[in-house]
Image (cartoon, helix red, strand yellow):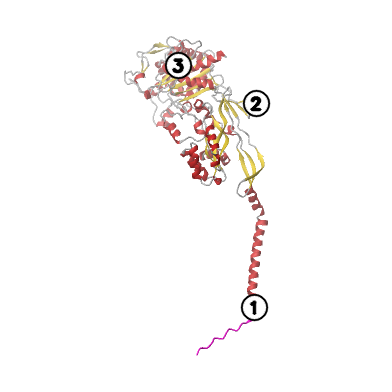
Amino acid sequence: MNRRRSPAIRNPAAEAQLFRRRALLGFLMATLGLLLLAGWYFHLQVLEHEQYATRSEANRIKQRPIVPGRGLIHDRAGRLLADNVPAYRLEIVAEEVRDIEATLRGLAEILPVSEEEVQRYRAARQATRGFRAVPLKLRLEEAEVARFAVNRHRFPGVDVVPYLTRRYPYGELFAHVVGYVGRVDEADLQRLGDRRYSVLTHIGKTGIEFQYEERLRGEIGQERVEQNVRGRDIRVLAREPGRPGQDLYLSIDARLQQATIDAFEGQHGAAVVVDPRSGEILAMVSLPAFDPNLFVGGISVADYRALMDSPSQPMFNRVVRGGYEPGSTIKPFVALAGLAEGIVRPETTVLSTGAYRLPGQSREYRDWRPGGHGRTNLVESLAQSVNTYYYHLAVELGIERLGRHMQAFGFGTPTGVDLPGESSGILPSPEWKRSARNEPWYPGETVISGIGQGFWVTTPLQLAQGTAIIAARGEHHPLHLLRESQDGFGAERVREPIAAPRRVVANAEHLAAVDRGLVAVMHSPTGTARATAQGLEYLIAGKTGTAQRVTRRGDASTSLDDLPFHLRHRALFMAYAPAEDPQLALALVVESGGSGSRAAAPVARRIFDAWLNRQEEQ
């Protein structure tokens, strides 16, 4: 028989007591939570008020840089060599585009969008907020702008935006002088040492654009912009415009630059034309060249590879970095050294039998003419380029004294011209050879140093500088390209300060003797370049030079025309004109020209004619 369990007896007093305890616990917890919240609010709004107020303001107010217009570059007559021109670019705001890939495919159907441009866009998009416009294609043609305008409704979030871009109107003509701008990269920012410049899109990479980057760039301004929580601009609170870059006026003359290039008639080489009275560079040519406009918007891989793989090295500035044996163009400077040291006088003669030997040695150092030139004085030694005269003179001077005089003319050290990357060349000496090769100096190396062979390496700039010193009657006017500057449109053009001239050769008689010899090169019946001077109505003082790339063995003689093109000798020439009152001094090299008299001297005459005939017409 089952017994039924009796129901529990409720205790109202105990339940009431339990409820009160639970209610009190809940009240205490709620009170503690409110106290903690109040304490945290106190911490934020009182103790940390200044910090968080500053951070809040920084989130709302943004400092944004203002990049000023880049300064223009002109030649001496005011012709624009580097300009800022309106252009159009195609930009995409990713936030407003539903399907980026479909949009890119659609744009490629109506515009020539390359895979490189697409890849560049994707990389930039990854580093940019979605509501920021990212360029897909730079420098649209007018026809492309019109074609997109017709299809604009198909591409929400895509737009054509006008902007200013760098342009080089003369293209290849000034590639190695003006240089070019390119997109800013991490290496540029590290070199500048200031992250503020990360706002720049382009920066000078080579030439004048690089040398005077700070002056051309100007000063970056700033503005204070209020933004909403999504980072969109609401209004501009304050604006401090930057200072535009300076306009630069170079000493280069565009017409003479073109005439210099034309004078080479397609040959590779380099030339520098200087006003010896001031040191201003009137023309500077390195051939072949390249189009700097390719680099402004970002050069394509194919174009860049073509430039870098070209055997003619169009990107290499032969004027500033090219190293050449000066050959016989060094002889006027060796002659001045011998005169200064009293080793020879203008009337001193040296017997040239066709071969020169050091005492006690059997090795022969030959003249270019078999059988020699007979007894030769200073003027004829230059006119006929007599090697024996300068073998003898170099040995009598000794390599140390010869080096000191050559250094006075600027050989072996950079000229200091206002272009980046200038080479110092090589002024041969026992110290240099010991340092560079860890070998002793041999007497025979002194012999061939007298005719610009052996370890000699000089740049066209150094040779032009030395030529200008002789043309300026012994005064050295530092070579330079920047002539004037201007702080914006309408401002007065200011002449750039230059260093005072320095006296290198003090004896006027010595200079006159060398001058007669250099004039005889061009205008005497025995001169090596007399054929070039036929029909001239003014006098040229010049000196030919040939830098050998192969040497003859024994008594064998090889015709220059029989050599392969890449093994032909380099043809050099230094000159100034008119000889009685020099207005121009130049130095040039024709690579694989073979002979200074046959290849280089005619180039110089065409350059002189272009300038002097124009001056006469004016």
Magenta portion: prevailing SS class: loop
Earlier-in-chain disc, 1 versus 3: 1
Q: Is 97 drawn above or below residue 557 in the view shown?
A: below
Earlier-in-chain disc, 3 versus 2: 2
Tag nearer the camera, 1 or 3: 1
How crowded pointer 1 is (Cα within 10 Å; few <14, some 14-19, many 20+) is rated as few
- Disc 3 and disc 2: Cα gap in Å? 41 Å
Q: Position of residue 361 (x, y in %)?
A: 34, 20
- Disc 1 and disc 3: Cα gap in Å? 121 Å
How crowded pointer 2 is (Cα within 10 Å; few <14, some 14-19, many 20+) is rated as few
- Disc 1 and disc 2: Cα gap in Å? 98 Å
Q: At 54% from the left edge and 15% from the top edge, which residue is drawn?
A: 614
Q: At 39% from the left edge and 20% from the top edge, which residue is drawn?
A: 594
Can you tell which mark lies on residue 17?
1
Look at label 2 and name its amino acid: Glu
Dot 3: what SS?
helix
Look at label 1 and name its amino acid: Gln
Q: Position of residue 588 (x, y in %)?
A: 46, 21
Look at label 3 and name its amino acid: Pro
Q: Which residue is mark 3?
A: 602
Is residue 562 among the parts visible in the rendering? yes
Q: Is residue 5 magenta?
A: yes
Q: Which residue is mark 2?
A: 492
Dot 2: what SS?
loop
Q: Position of residue 605 (x, y in %)?
A: 47, 16
Tag nearer the camera, 1 or 2: 1
Dot 1: what SS?
helix
What residue span does the magenta drawing correspond to?
1-17
Q: Nearer the viewer, residue 610 or 20?
A: 20
Q: Are marks 1 and 2 in contact (CB under 8 Å)?
A: no
Q: Position of residue 98 (x, y in %)?
A: 53, 47
Earlier-in-chain disc, 1 versus 2: 1
